[in-house]
Image: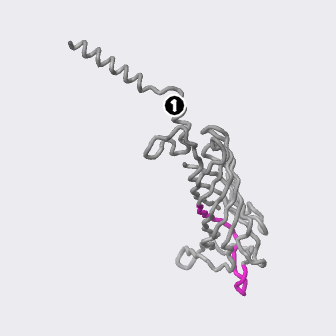
Amino acid sequence: MMNKLIYSFLFLLVSLSGEAQFTSEGADLISRFRPGVMWFNTGLRPAEIEKVRKYDRLVFDITYSDWAGESKPFQNKWASLGLNSSIYFDIPMVKNNLVSFGTGLSHSLFTIHHDNQFVSDPTGKYTLYNELDTLLFDKNKLVGNSISIPVEFRFRSKGWKHVKFHIGGKVGYQLNLFQKTQFDGNNGKVIEKSYDMADVNRLNYAVHMRFGIRNWALFGSYNLNGLFKSNESVKLNLLQFGLSLSLY
């Protein structure tokens, strides 16, 4: 009797193991349709095989920030980092989502470490960029925060290990732009923030591109208008390039 029970249990175990095995086709479907770091997340319900997959909906651009114009790029310090955080709608334009349109909401933070100084002219109408012979401070950087609406066309190859190319731009609003300076005072280190730049360009618009594989890409961005709007002000356009990571 005991032998029969053991044989019956082994037969049942082998049968269940056979049913639980994935075919190569099934494994391909599981991996192919879950892009990004959240590869195994399909929400409250299982993913539908026939549903068009969407990509690059949560994107972070980690950048080196600089400017171009009257002051040439790559003259500032390499600690000039920035971070763009964007939420996109990925809207398919063709079958299999090989071409799509992306738009959403983005926040941009940039810091540019430099050895000179932004000052307002005596009339308070425009901004000058003074090149100093000797440093009057230990650290000095320009900091900016902005929000924008990005739009881009997205091209990608087939499969989840796809090559992708994004080209587009954004229109945004400069929330703040200030100079942060650290220097030695009588009682130790002193940090000052200066918001008195006379003519900050609140409206900004830029072009950008990404080129990469799956959820990694190289990133580049260039602001078409300057940081300051007066014709008398120093002409500087924000420039960023770095690495993009798509989490979902």
Amino acid type, residue under disc 1 in the picture: Ala
SS at badge 1? helix
Vertical position of residue 218 compared to residue 73: above or below: above
Residue 108 location, x and y as percent?
Answer: 61, 63
Residue occupied by mark 1: 27
The magenta stretch spans residue 215: no
> Residue 112: which quarter of the image?
bottom right
Task: Give the vertical position of 246 relative to 116 (above or below).
Answer: above
Name the residue: 67% across, 46% down. Answer: 99
Tell me which corner region of the image, top left, top right, bottom left or bottom right, holds residue 28: top right
Image colouring: one colour
Residue at the spot 73% in from the left edge and 70% down from the top edge: 226
Vertical relation: 146 (above or below) 87? below
Q: Is residue 117 magenta?
A: yes
Quarter the N terminus occupies: top left
Is 233 drawn above or below residue 79 in the view shown?
below
Which residue of the protein is positioned furthest toward the left in this rendering? 1
Q: Which residues are magenta?
A: 105-126
Instruction: Point out residue 33 in the picture as x, y percentages from the top left corner.
Output: 55, 39
Number of residues whose C-alpha sits closer than 10 Å to that of mark 1, classed few (under 14), some (14–19) or many (20 or more): few
How many numbered marks are there?
1
Residue closest to the far bottom: 123
- Between 15 and 86, the residue placed more toward the observer is 15
Q: Residue at x 65, y 62 (%)?
A: 80
Please state if 50 lies on the left or on the right of 223 as rendered: left
Seen from the viewer's position, the closer of residues 221 and 57 is 57
Residue 183 image offset from top left, x and y in percent: 60, 74
Left or right: residue 247 compared with residue 8: right
